[in-house]
Amino acid sequence: MAQAGQGQGTRSRGLKLTDILVTIVIAVVFGIVYKIWGPMYDVFKPLGLHAEQLSYGMWFLAGTFAFLIIRKPGAAVLAEVAAASVSALLGSEWGISTLWYGLLQGLGAEIVFAVFLYRNFSVWVASLAAIGAAAGSLVLDFGYGYIDRLTAWNYTLFIGLRLIGSIVIAGILAYSLSKALELTGVTKGLRPASKQDYDALHRT
């Protein structure tokens, strides 16, 4: 019997046009959220000790949430890139680099979902995907020289707080939002039919 949070699709696992359109809609919503959330990063800064890193997970939310809704390969990276594009078009303070962050963050999350063969949709895997997205963002942070002059304890605090914020926002919150949406029934038509679905049909 399949474990909770897992399922095996019996339809094509590739993204269909409907999946892409829904992912884009999700991305547009989160792209607007990303733009609005931008100033929050600076609000946390005066608190010191890299407290602003706790807010960083918001920029990974599109990818993890989209995958938990669509449950197909490519959904996470498509959502992150599209959301970053919307944020950039709205005048993101990080300019064109926003697109690179979207790509690396989406790939970071996508790799985690791929490791679990796109069949595990638990809060734990969502949290690991959030960490993957955070890792992607850190690669670019180092590349752009944003965090190349920190002491060892500062690195530990900086990265640790970003990971915590990522798990809470892009992991736990994304999972909770997807479960809340499931209760409305709107996700049923978007996902591959699972073994449980066919078993239920055979019992009727």
Image: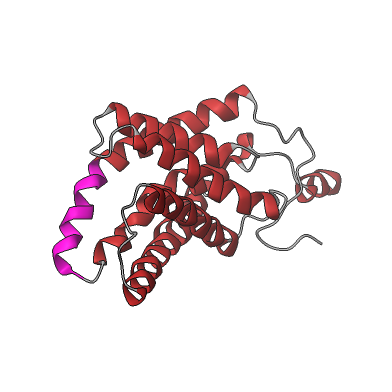
- The percent position of residue 195, horizontal first and vertical second, equals 80, 48
Q: Write the start and end of the magenta stretch as one range.
A: 36-48
- The percent position of residue 196, horizontal first and vertical second, equals 77, 51
Which image quarter is the N terminus in? bottom right
**Residue, far bottom:** 153
Q: How is the image coloured?
A: secondary structure
Q: How many marks?
A: 0
Q: Residue at x 44, y 31 (%)?
A: 82
Which image quarter is the C terminus in? top right
Q: Residue at x 34, y 55 (%)?
A: 56
Does the magenta segment cover residue 160? no
Q: Residue at x 33, y 59 (%)?
A: 147
**Residue, far left:** 46
- Of residues 79 and 100, which is closer to you in this image? 100
- Of residues 153 and 76, which is closer to you in this image? 153
Q: Is residue 17 left or right of residue 24?
A: right
Please tell me whether residue 143 is drawn above or below residue 47 in the rendered image: above
Q: In this view of the protein, can residue 185 be seen by the observer?
A: no
- Of residues 51 and 180, which is closer to you in this image? 51
- Of residues 138 and 110, which is closer to you in this image? 138
- The percent position of residue 8, horizontal first and vertical second, equals 76, 48
Q: Residue at x 19, y 48 (%)?
A: 39
Q: In this view of the protein, can residue 83 be seen by the observer?
A: yes
Q: Main secondary structure of the magenta part?
A: helix
Does the magenta segment cover residue 41? yes
- The percent position of residue 57, horizontal first and vertical second, equals 38, 55
For residue 67, which quarter of the picture? top right
